Amino acid sequence: MIKRMRLMLVAALSVLVVACGAGAPAPSGVTLEPVRPMPPQATEITSAPNQRGDQSCDATASLRPGALPPRGAMPAGSSMAQIAANGRVRVGVAQDGYLFGFRNPRTGVLEGFDIDIAREIARDLLGDPSKVDLVPLSSAERIPALRGGRVDLVVNTFSTTCERNKEIDFSAVYYVSEQKILVVNSSGIRSAADLAGKRACSVTGTTSLEPLFALPKPPTVIGMQTWTDCLVALQQGAADAISTDAPILHGLALQDNNLEVVGTPMAFDSYAIGIPDGKTDLVRFVNASLDRMRADGTWQALYQKHLSLLGASPGPPAPKYKD
């Protein structure tokens, strides 16, 4: 009896296996698109902010400098004397912009071209380049930090524009950059036109956004808080490209041999020092300090120290003054 039940069970299982094999549906051929989630802390930007659009002024022109006061002896009642009374000058800088303003991972110290420009202003203001408090700021924090009195100056790859001039003042231009694209070298992206249908990362609050939206076929624009956030997004495949000023891109590329800067310039940016609105004496002082750096070779020495990887020095840009 037991043997007969075993034979019946084996026969039933055989029929079931055959039935399942014979009746299994053929693959449907449906292919699902890969899920491409937004990177953490990212925001999709759907329209260009008006950072460049206003052309009603010459944004690169600043107030003519006067003579530099003796170091450590600022005129009584001046904006410089108020800063000197605190014993230190507070300067907003970047900590993620390799070459211009970044935190050295070995020492934890902030370094770069902008950092040393800030120290030179402290030298002229207080007689000591070390008497500077470096305040890390994101791009979006620069203007609020000046307007709210959190910092005295901003030296942070800060492009001067007419729109920004409505809220703060700027020094004369101390560096001119061009906007390009950073990609993985196997991506096939070689120009701005190749960004159509792709995801381009940039930082919110910067002038780098508008040239992306001005393309005939704009990419999806991802806004991040820092350039290192964009770098991680590119490395992880959450973005196809990063677009901003070429020196910043080259600084990112130096951190990953799989990346390269490509394309012709999409736009040009003029870096100047941000100064609180209405402090004209401080504008003239900073311009006098920048003039000193151009004349005594300091600017050139700082370029060789921090930016020589970008190629031969173009020399400091000639200042343009409005009076």
Image (cartoon, rainbow, N blue to C red):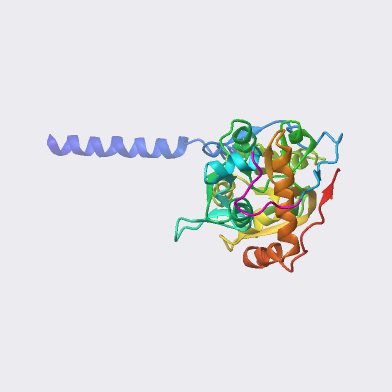
**Residue at 58% across, 33% down:** 149
**For residue 43, what is the image quadrant?**
top right
User: Magenta region: which residues?
Assistant: 67-76
Residue 71 in magenta stretch: yes
Residue lying furthest left? 1
What secondary structure do most residues of the magenta stretch adopt?
loop
The residue lying toward the viewer, choosing from 210 and 298, is: 298
**Residue at 74% across, 61% down:** 294
Q: Position of residue 46 (x, y in %)?
A: 70, 31
**110 displayed left or right of 10:** right
On the question of residue 263 being in view, the answer is yes
**57 displayed left or right of 27:** right
**For residue 218, what is the image quadrant?**
top right
**Residue at 79% across, 49% down:** 266
Q: Decide: is 81 above or below 185.
A: above
**217 displayed left or right of 198:** right
